[in-house]
Image (spheres, rainbow, N blue to C red):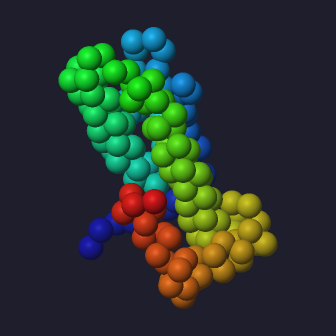
Amino acid sequence: MATRGRIAGTQLVPLRSVVYSPMSHRRLYLLGDAAHIVPPMSAKGMNLALYDAEVFAKAVIRHQVNDQDSALLDAYSSTCLRHVWNYQAFAAWWTELIHNAGDSSHQGEFRHQAARADLARLFASGSANRLLSEFIAGLN
């Protein structure tokens, strides 16, 4: 039988989000964590990095194959940032929801009950569940 110790204290660790915009400057292109950091609770950091890499690779290939056509390279930052901000918004919402749904001391009883209602809706509503599933799977 394991010995249990007492919990001396609890606190929420602030999770940081960072987005550098634009994600390029002249011939310097930022990808993944160099361009944006998403709180780990949403589990989107690697997905966003791979998306950046795919967009960048396609742009470089087009530039090299099509006589220095830089249209995709020029659009790299704006293309990626639409995706990045979508998942930053999801990460902020999901983190707040989970923290509030689990502990009323985070932002009070009202936010706790509202978060519990939001969480219940995600499982009771087909459309809410589909949207959550799309975000978690990286399809949104």
Q: In the rendered view, tell whether residue 18 sits above or below residue 107.
A: above
User: x, y (%) of residue 104?
Assistant: 69, 69
Q: Which quadrant of the view contains residue 9?
A: bottom right
Task: Note whether 128 is above or below 86 in the view shown.
Answer: below
Q: Quadrant of the C terminus?
A: bottom left
Residue 57: x and y, percent? 27, 31
Q: Residue furthest left?
A: 65
At x 45%, y 24%, the residue is 74
Position in image of residue 2 (x %, y %)? 29, 68
Residue sitting nearer the eye, 91 or 84: 84
Q: Nearer the viewer, residue 62 or 35?
A: 62
Which residue is drawn at the image coordinates 46% and 55% (left, top)? 42
Q: Residue furthest top?
A: 26
For residue 8, say whether it is visible.
no
Q: How many marks?
A: 0
Q: Is residue 109 visible?
A: yes
Q: Residue furthest bottom?
A: 124
Left or right: 61 as drawn, with respect to 48: left
- The image quadrant where one finds the N terminus is bottom left
Q: Is residue 117 above or below residue 87?
A: below
Residue 53 spot, x, y in % from top left: 30, 35
From what the image shows, is residue 47 above or below residue 110?
above
Residue for point 39% across, 29% down: 72
Which of 55/107 is in front? 55
- For the point 59% across and 51% down, which residue is it? 89
